[in-house]
Amino acid sequence: MTSPEVPKRSKLELLKDGSRQLRGTIAEELLNDSDEFTGDSCQLLKHHGSYQQDDRDLRKAKNPDGTRKGKAFSCMIRTRVPGGKVTAEQFLAELDLCDQYGDGTVRLTTRQGFQLHGVIKGNLKAAIKGINDSKLTTLAACGDVNRNVMACPAPYKNNAIFDSMQDMAYALAEHLKPKTTSYFDLWITDEAGNKTNEAEFQPVEEPIYGKVYLPRKFKIGIALPEDNCVDIYTQDIGLLAIVENEEIIGYNFYVGGGMGVTPSNKKTYAALAKPLGFVENDQVLAVAEAVVKVQRDFGNREDRKQARMKYLVNNLGIEKFREKVSEYLGGPLIAPRDIEVTGIDDHMGWHDQGDGKLFFGVNIENGRIKDEGDLRIKTGLRKILETYQFDARITAKQSVIFCDIDPADRDAIEQILVDHGMKKADELTLIRRFSMSCPALPMCGLSVTESERVLPDLITEFEEELTRQGLQGERISVNMTGCPNGCARPYIPDIGLVGKAVGKYTLFLGGNSLGNRLAFIYDDMVPLGEITSRLSPLLEYYKEERQTDESFGDFCHRKGKESLQEKAGLTAK
Ligand code: SF4
């Protein structure tokens, strides 16, 4: 008699299974003298919001005697901020913590969170506790669970629409939060009171995730049809608000989006989310939970490169996937409303909030808050927050919105920007406002080449080229990453740049700033120094033959790869 086949599980699945709800040996390792965590702890740490990294610029550094110094380890700490909504106090706490424990910079992420970098192991607990003291959390900012829930951050007050999306982001984040007490035992409770050891461990119920959590990370975003600022189609679940009579009556659910690709593994690909159904407000949590549970039970736990929900949705087919979700929900899903994404807003500059107050979006290039030379972003933001105590919002384009501003304070706030070398949105080109990058080198262990450190200069080159061609007013989105994992969503903008080798990039074209179409590979292994010159003939072509109001991405999509390559004198690949 043959025994029933036991499904194979990846090493990481076995690690989670034996981890006593994500504890592993983190507590013991926090107490030892080593400057690094073991590999297993590094994996579990992600669920607590931290990645161990090492500064790759320092890898080759040598001691005076000529021997290698060895890796300089530190941790990145990511804070989960549903909808990017923070108080002045919370924002200031992150600024304080980056000075106290980090590398003196804070990064606003592409998922509306904060990141601290360069926190050494000995300071990790104090930094996470500091974040928790500000009533934010790093729990589930990373790891195989639902991560930060994104939502349109615009703080308009003249109807209930924007607050409803923000409230829904918070409700989803709370509903899908892991219940493990390991986070509090490890980071919040002092050593004497924690229950991290084997003998004292008492499991709590994880009603949604079960013992081994999800097969892979999980992402949710909420937007309006006229403003897809959080890129809902790139999410595991994208929610598109359906508005009637100035109220959200429910959401179209889209499922199975995801950006990560491994070029050497032909079974991996970027995917846009597909329509699942229309869901009324009071059913959103239940349907989201059902989707998460389908992924929990049917997602691939053998091969992590096939574990994102996009592969499950595509392998089953959307109809079968929908049937499974209905089964878990205990009732049928309603057909999605016939509605399309039609716009995108970066929410920068001054806006009337609708209640007599203003909000002000300040572009932070690539989300990096730091002081460098005359550009003193960290000090400038600190001054605004300390002086006015504004609530703030982090946008999906790594920037910040200050809320509830008295119109009488407008000039003084603008003066603070000027005093710190910062620019208002209307002083920046659209291509700079609509560009973003992942951190990549020197800290990201997966990066194959530069991203954040080279994009500002590359955008300057693009600006010069656009001006030369009389296209300086065009809104062209540019997303760049240092590897194909796609953290800055590079497979959907007008121009996507994905690190392929040191100093070389795969060039994607034909997406758009609305984020509702995948771009195609136009060229590969393009040296950084040649990107602008390779795009130059295409911009000329665009200028000559574009249709009224056609964006660069739409033009590239309409013309297609071969026509573009022919125009540029490239052999079709
Ligand atoms: Fe690192 Fe790659 Fe993500 Fe960039 S895209 S942060 S290089 S993993």
Image (cartoon, rainbow, N blue to C red):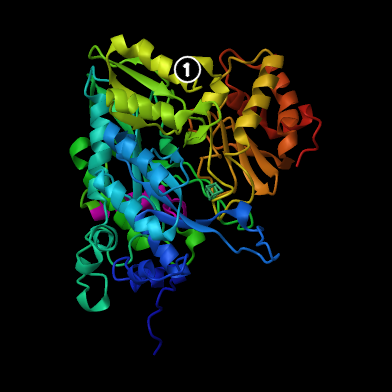
SS class, disc 1: helix
Image quadrant where residue 179 sits? bottom left
Residue 494 on the magenta span = no
List the residue tagged with mark 1: 418
> Around disc 1, counting alpha carbons within 10 Å, would you say few (fewer than 14), some (14 to 19), or many (20 or more)?
some
Which quadrant, please, contains the C terminus? top right
Q: Main secondary structure of the magenta part?
A: helix
Q: Residue furthest bottom?
A: 1
Choose between 123 and 147: the one closer to the eye: 123
Which residue lies at the image location 58% right of the left edge and 12% below the top edge? 548
**57 versus 492 height, above or below:** below
Which residue is nearer to you in this view: 382 or 479?
382
Q: Is residue 324 magenta?
A: yes
- Work out whether residue 377 can be spotted: yes
| Point 51% across, 22% down: residue | 421
Establish if 25 lies above or below 52: below
Residue in view at x 69 percent, y 34 percent: 561
- Image side of residue 194 versus residue 558, left or right: left
| Amino acid of disc 1 | Val
Residue 512 occupies quadrant = top right
Disc 1 residue: CB within 8 Å of ligand 1: no
What span is colored magenta in the figure? 308-328
